[in-house]
Image (cartoon, helix red, strand yellow):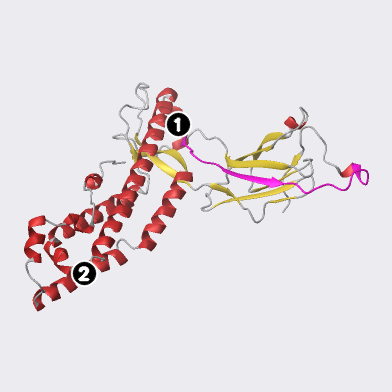
Amino acid sequence: MNFQVTGLGLDKMKLDSPQSFLDQEEVEEAEDGQLLEPEAWRTYVERRNALQEFLTSDLSPHLLKRHHARMELLKKCSYYIEILPKHLALGDQNPLVLPTTMFQLIDPWKFQRMKKVGAAQTKIQLLLLGDLLEQLDHGRSELDALLESPDPRPFLAGWGLVEQRLADLSAVMDSFLAMMVPGRLHVKHRLVSDIGATKIPHIRLMLSTKMPVMFDRKESVAHQDWVSLRWFVTIQQAVPEQFELRYKLLDPRTQQECMQCGIIPVAACAFDIRNLLPNRAYKFTVKRAESYTLVYEPWRDSLTLHTRPGPPEGLAPSRLGKLGLSLTTPSER
């Protein structure tokens, strides 16, 4: 992954007003004329239309809003290392070594170190993406203000700097789009230790992204002494995934109530938790089960549900929630 980003220095151009683009001498020279000549007016209209076209297509509010949404999604994703064979060793006619086989050849200590490098690289990438998006927002505000200026003469006088600004913002957008997808993880040292004459294919490490696991807030409901939980992943993996579901009672009042919590491994996207207390609030969190290749997981979804009140005291004590460790069952729905 290449973090050398074009256009990162654009924020050094501080603009106090729309005319900050303009050379002061050119502005004063333009102001000497009382009215624009017809040819100058046509040039002004053409350039103004070009700027409007850029702001409505390449840097439109809708496009920036969509990029902000994608950025928020990336902040919630999980990031993993993928090990891929680069090519076979010279003269080796065997099939490609599968990633699962290569894990057996990789030095575990070196791989753990690479996971830390991958986490740092991912954090840097997210920070750079945020910086680039901020530059795009700021650049659009600057150009909007320039477009709204009522005097056409400064606009014409400083058009050269406006063109440069448009080129800079286009470069920032290109860098932003290129960095949206995680890429190669840079390896400074060999991960496979020397093991005699065995031929080991060169490998490359890639950072991959998995979409966040999120509760279905419409389908997840609380009953009197149990809850039915549903969650989903925007892009389903080809291989079924394992999840980790956690729950706990909020504001326990006794030592026994402190036991109303648990961690449950689930191999589906639905689960029912039973034997909860009526009329109480519970917090639930869900995430993927731990993986050997996970390098960075900055976010996990959480949901708070309130169980329904029980029947009036003395009417149906057998239906009240029991204290102690909760019994849990996979959902049949």
Sequence-first tag of 2 and 1: 2
| Residue occupying image coordinates x 6% and y 66% | 32
Residue, disc 1: 103
- Could you tell whether 52 is left or right of 308 in the image? left
Q: Secondary structure at mark 1?
A: helix
Q: Which residues are magenta?
A: 294-317
Label 2 amino acid? Answer: Arg
Membership of 228 in magenta stretch: no
Label 1 amino acid? Answer: Phe
Q: Nearer the viewer, mark 2 or mark 1?
A: 2
- Could you tell whether 32 is left or right of 327 in the image? left
Disc 2 to disc 1, how far (Cα)? 59 Å
Membership of 300 in magenta stretch: yes
Of the 4 image quadrants, the one containing the C terminus is bottom right
| Residue occupying image coordinates x 43% and y 32% | 102
Residue 48's label in the rendered image is 2
Q: Is residue 57 visible?
A: no
- Residue 268, horizontal then vertical, whole percent: 64, 46
> What residue occupies the far bottom of the structure in this picture?
38
Of the 4 image quadrants, the one containing the N terminus is top left
